[in-house]
Amino acid sequence: MLSSKDRHLLRDLLSSNRFGTFFGVSQQVLDLVWQALTSPTGESVTYISMEIGADLDVFHPVRDKLQQLEITEHPDEAGNRLLQLFLHGPVKIPNYSGGLGILAGDTLKSFADCKIPVVGISLLYRKGYFSQVVDSKIGQVAWASQWEPENTPGLYLLHDPDSPGQPLTIEIPFYDLQGIRFSAHAQLWLKMEINEALDFFVPEILLDYQTALSPDWIQDAAQHLYNSSSEKIKATQRRLLGAGIIPVMEALGLTSRTIHLNEQHGVGVVLSLITQLLQKKYGHQYEKKATDRHILAAAAEVAKRLVFTIHTPVKAGHDRFSASMYEELINPFCRRVLNLLALDENDPSVYNFTAMAMQLNRATNSVSRLHKEVTQKQFPQYAKKITAITNGVHHLTWTSKARAELYDTFPELHNWRKDPSVFARVESLRANNKFRTYFEHAWRTDTKVLADYVNQMLITHRNQCLATWIDPPNYLSYRKEEEAPFKYTTFTLGFARRFSTYKRADLIFEDLDRLAAIITENNWPVNFIYAGKAHPSDEPGKDLIRNILTVQEELYLKSNGLAKLVFIPGYDMHLAKMMVAGSHAWLNSPKRPLEASGTSGMKAALNGVPNVSIMDGWWVEGYHRGQTGWKFGYEDIVSPEHFSEQQSSLLYNEDSDSFYTVFPEMLRLFYDPSLHGQYIDKGIANLTLNYPIFNTHRMAAEYVARYDLDLAPELQQEMEKFRRLYCSDPSF
């Protein structure tokens, strides 16, 4: 039987507007957010990303509140269905592939925490990215992800207020080779990124093109994230995002005067905005009346609304498509606009959409200080406008339960959930024996969780091979004499990210004899735990996964069983959180300077886990002269010849040699009782030096400055406090 207090709370968790009924926030909060996003002042931001990662098994504030209060039912039938979904529904939303999407989700969560009026727009992929199966002989096998947005908590199909019972839809024009117009139709889903206090949220609008009115090939293009089955499919997917932005804003009454493009995927919005301006000025004859000069003037005006973040220096991340292909996608006038704004300066038969996005904005930023330098050299014509905002991570998402309980225990860290800057006070706890003891205990707890997971996985894989065609990917699954080979007391090195050649996942296994000698000569056991996906069409990336599988047995035997290497299939946010908290050190081994930022190491740092990394991306800023971890590899000046991703230029010999020099020092600090305190010091230093900086609250505050939002004085003051934590770019 529900108490009156619970009934009151549940009433406050149910809200509605003309687009639907929602669970998790009060009517007052829904109205407040919607009013801010539809205000005539336009003091809000529309945040565009091809992918958004926000799985509910790593951050689920509504469910946590219900469980905390032991609420299991709702008196209203519709409310009860939603409540049961939040308590027992699926927790995976496979609308992301990796870093870019997870960063987008983290960013939107921090905007919600900080109560910044932002709306996210992305696509809804009915078959997600892909589910990963790994076989010892075949390597990675990609399966379509299976999920149902209709049965996912916090995801709502919006209703058309003018057509009761019908979904809210938008229409995107396409053209065939004969110039005949046809349409793609998307229904709109809303996902709420609700903050921990349940008193604010950021809506994500997801465009779902799986409707009967959309042609089959359009539906096919929109089913899988980063579908690269053809160049036309890739270009179509980008168009479905970019061309959908303004129709979404109009359908929902969104008035943001700032549109934030993350990568160039959504830059097609420029075509819509230019067309709007010219149509307003010249009427329906705008296509004939507008000269090239008029188009360029309109583009300059449109640029004032755009903020652009470039997330990678790697060529595969920059969209270049044949100009002739667009005869099948857009009308002649839009092609005329692209011919003025997007032609590649080195190949006029190609549209370069990264260069177009770089040109058309009022603010451009890279995602770390070093990445700024790299981007300026890649795009020298825009060097003066490129600034840096170093990435961060959402601290409430990535701090483990054991670490969170530790932080809750000490009054010095009071209010850490709302204010990550309080971790600067950890310096005063460095010599506190109680804190050090609790810190080590939380670390052991998380390492045991990870070790237990790996041990159970090895057994599960061994048993599965009897019932399926899949051979266990890990050598240790075949060694039945070791039922639990992974010990939580053993030094554990973690590595998890996208498998791409420049990230060099197999770098430290370049010389197995030398690596094994380091381990055996000192009798230092080591667990190497790897995870990550390669894009299904990235054969060199899939080869890297096979390399990790291949070296396992040889490394085990050469080290007399002291070195145990495993690969965990099915990498996702839940596994990432377990790994960054349970490792004793986090490995990052890209070729400098091709890692724009990287965020997995930040997630480790938030749990007090040191990094061992190439001096690339964020680690250049997070290393702090060795107080927070170790560096290895090339770290000299960066010039254009270092941007090559060719195998011969990847510096395997040089950088692995450097790692083998550093690795014994790490193990000695960990295993020598007289030195172990220094290892703990490095962990604690991450809390003091990196936690206050590499979080998305600070990052969001820096973006708010680029957005030039007119915020309430108290909110502006809060953002300034976070900005004072760190300045990514002193020149800004």
Image (tube, rainbow, N blue to C red):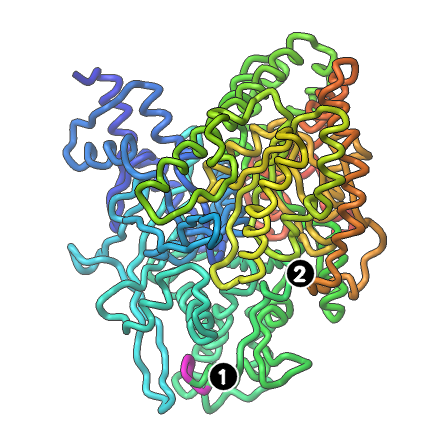
In this rendered view, identify the residue nearer to me: 601 or 510.
510
Q: Which residue is mark 1?
A: 335
State the residue lying farthest toward the top.
434
The structure residue drawn at horizontal position 29% and vertical position 30%, both measured from the top left corner, is 87
The structure residue drawn at horizontal position 40% and vertical position 43%, both measured from the top left corner, is 33
Crowding at label 1, few (<14), some or many (≥20) Cα neighbours within 10 Å? Answer: some
Secondary structure category for the residue under label 2: loop
Query: In which quadrant is the N terminus drawn?
Result: top left
Q: Is residue 561 visible?
A: yes
Q: Main secondary structure of the magenta part?
A: loop
Magenta stretch contains residue 331: yes
State the residue lying farthest toward the right.
636
Crowding at label 2, few (<14), some or many (≥20) Cα neighbours within 10 Å? Answer: some
The structure residue drawn at horizontal position 45% and vertical position 87%, both measured from the top left corner, is 332
Q: Amino acid at mark 1?
A: Arg
Q: How far from the left and from the top, in percent, is residue 673? A: 74, 14
Cβ–Cβ under 8 Å for marks 1 and 2:
no
Q: How far from the left and from the top, in percent, is residue 594? A: 69, 56
Secondary structure category for the residue under label 1: helix
* For residue 302, side relative to residue 155 (left or right): right
Q: Which residue is mark 2?
A: 313
Residue 696 position by quadrant: top right
Tell me which segment is drawn in magenta. Answer: 328-332
Q: CA distance from mark 1 to mark 2?
A: 27 Å
> Number of marks in the image?
2
